[in-house]
Image: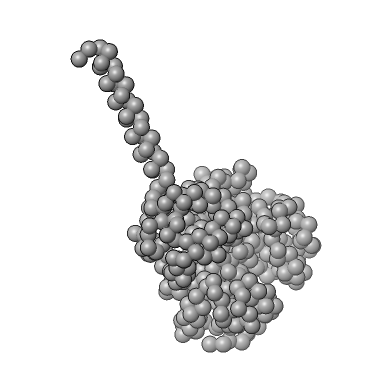
């Protein structure tokens, strides 16, 4: 073979190898979960420090300007050590409102905000100060009411540093580690405070998991009660309920599947089984908050994004979904529960709520359940808020509460 011919053959081989490498790299990139960037703020980037820290250890604490909607409170943020679902160290953040002039060791409420998002920028530690009305925290009236009662309020970023939407068990762990961190921060003077939990919908998932995990995961915490509403307690039923037809909130289901893939990358490979439409939707949701998730996924359907017949048919996905379904978790809370929901809520499986509460009652947990007179998921949140607050007030006062068991 002549020199010129050898060069041509070599050049062709190199080009072919480069083309194959590019295809393989592109396929591998498509198959891997996509993660959003962390906020640029160094406060969120203390992961290396958490490697030698115990869950709940304070990694950093700082004063923050109090949001204009919040009255009569000093504001703090704490970065703390926690672990993800594989037991690897992560850094999480919680925001704390402490009433000005509060008594030491007064009540401490951990409030789990609704976070339907795949971007850490959508978490409360960011959105409490946003000027975007679509992202702003709307609970200022309720927060001010409990702050006036002398309660310190902690609001954790319970989806964690990768915004693992759908990873409900992780949310419970981060919530409990956030409480530990707040109580370990001497500046806040709540080291011996009674603790209560509250949250609705996605925030209710983190609340419910924290309540159920507490006896085994954080038995030292003095949790006196938990108020949770509109809780999706069985993710498998929710996924199957979406079906295969176009659905107005398909984006939320798809985002939750992507969030679980982020949290369990060695057990779920959804991205590797997406159609071009599915990959485009995934990439559009990578750093999306609630409104964008709803907009991008509106009218979407499973056959559009993947040939998989059901999301729970993906190898590994079913076990992960069940692992994050409170109905299937054998643990029970060790403090009273107040739960509220719409009896005809179309977004969540109500029968799973009933089955979970029946199991709690059978185990001796005092449960007070309220069915709100509305078919709508979000209006139920408002209708049950007054009774939930009354329940928490009585628990902090040490009073017994009625049971519907």
Say above or below: 312 vs 368. above
Q: Position of residue 222 (x, y in %)?
A: 58, 71
260 or 387, nearer to the observer? 260
Q: Position of residue 74 (x, y in %)?
A: 75, 58
Q: How many marks?
A: 0
Say above or below: 283 vs 336. above
Q: Describe the colour scheme in one phrase.
A: one colour
51 or 33, nearer to the observer? 33
82 or 164, nearer to the observer? 164
- Residue that appears at 68% across and 64% down: 153
- Residue that appears at 65% across and 68% down: 109
Q: Position of residue 362 (x, y in %)?
A: 46, 85
Q: State which quarter of the image contains the N terminus.
A: top left
Q: In the figure, is residue 371 to the left or right of 317?
A: right
User: Looking at the image, which residue sits at the far left?
Assistant: 1
- Residue that appears at 56% across and 87% down: 404
Q: Quadrant of residue 207?
A: bottom right
Q: In the figure, is residue 16 to the left or right of 387?
A: left
Residue 393 seen in the current view: no
Residue 12 seen in the current view: yes
Q: Position of residue 58 (x, y in %)?
A: 59, 53
- Residue that appears at 75% across and 56% down: 67
Q: Quadrant of residue 56?
A: bottom right
């Amino acid at each position: 073979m002549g020199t010129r011919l050898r060069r041509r053959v070599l050049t062709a081989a190199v080009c072919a190898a480069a083309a194959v490498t590019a295809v393989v790299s592109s396929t591998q990139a498509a198959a891997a979960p996509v993660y959003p960037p962390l906020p640029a703020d160094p406060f969120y980037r203390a992961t290396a420090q958490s490697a030698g820290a115990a869950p709940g250890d304070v990694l950093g604490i700082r004063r923050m300007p109090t949001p204009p909607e919040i009255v009569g409170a000093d504001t703090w943020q704490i970065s703390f050590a926690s672990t993800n679902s594989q037991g690897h160290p992560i850094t999480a953040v919680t925001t704390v409102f402490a009433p000005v002039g509060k008594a030491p060791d007064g009540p401490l409420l951990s409030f789990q905000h609704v976070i339907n998002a795949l971007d850490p920028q959508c978490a409360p530690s960011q959105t409490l100060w946003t000027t975007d009305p679509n992202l702003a925290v709307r609970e200022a009236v309720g927060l001010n009411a409990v702050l006036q009662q002398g309660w310190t309020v902690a609001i954790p970023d319970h989806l964690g540093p990768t915004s693992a939407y759908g990873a409900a068990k992780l949310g419970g762990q981060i919530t409990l580690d956030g409480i530990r961190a707040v109580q370990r921060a001497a500046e806040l003077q709540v080291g011996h405070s009674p603790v209560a939990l509250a949250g609705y919908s996605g925030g209710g998932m983190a609340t419910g998991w924290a309540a159920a995990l507490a006896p085994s995961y954080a038995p030292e915490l003095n949790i006196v009660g938990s108020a949770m509403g509109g809780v999706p307690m069985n993710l498998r039923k929710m996924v199957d309920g979406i079906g295969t037809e176009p659905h107005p909130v398909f984006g939320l289901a798809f985002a939750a599947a992507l969030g679980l893939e982020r949290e369990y990358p060695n057990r779920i490979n959804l991205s590797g089984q997406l159609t071009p439409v599915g990959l485009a939707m995934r990439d559009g949701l990578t750093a999306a908050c609630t409104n964008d998730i709803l907009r991008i996924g509106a009218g979407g359907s499973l056959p559009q994004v993947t040939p998989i017949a059901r999301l729970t048919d993906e190898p590994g996905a079913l076990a992960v979904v069940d692992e994050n379904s409170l109905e299937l978790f054998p643990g029970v809370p060790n403090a009273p529960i107040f739960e509220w929901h719409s009896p005809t809520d179309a977004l969540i499986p109500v029968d799973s709520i009933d089955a979970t509460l029946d199991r709690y009652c059978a185990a001796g947990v005092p449960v007070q359940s309220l069915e709100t007179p509305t078919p709508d998921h979000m209006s139920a949140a408002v209708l049950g808020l007054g009774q939930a607050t009354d329940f928490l007030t009585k628990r902090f006062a040490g009073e017994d509460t009625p049971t519907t068991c």
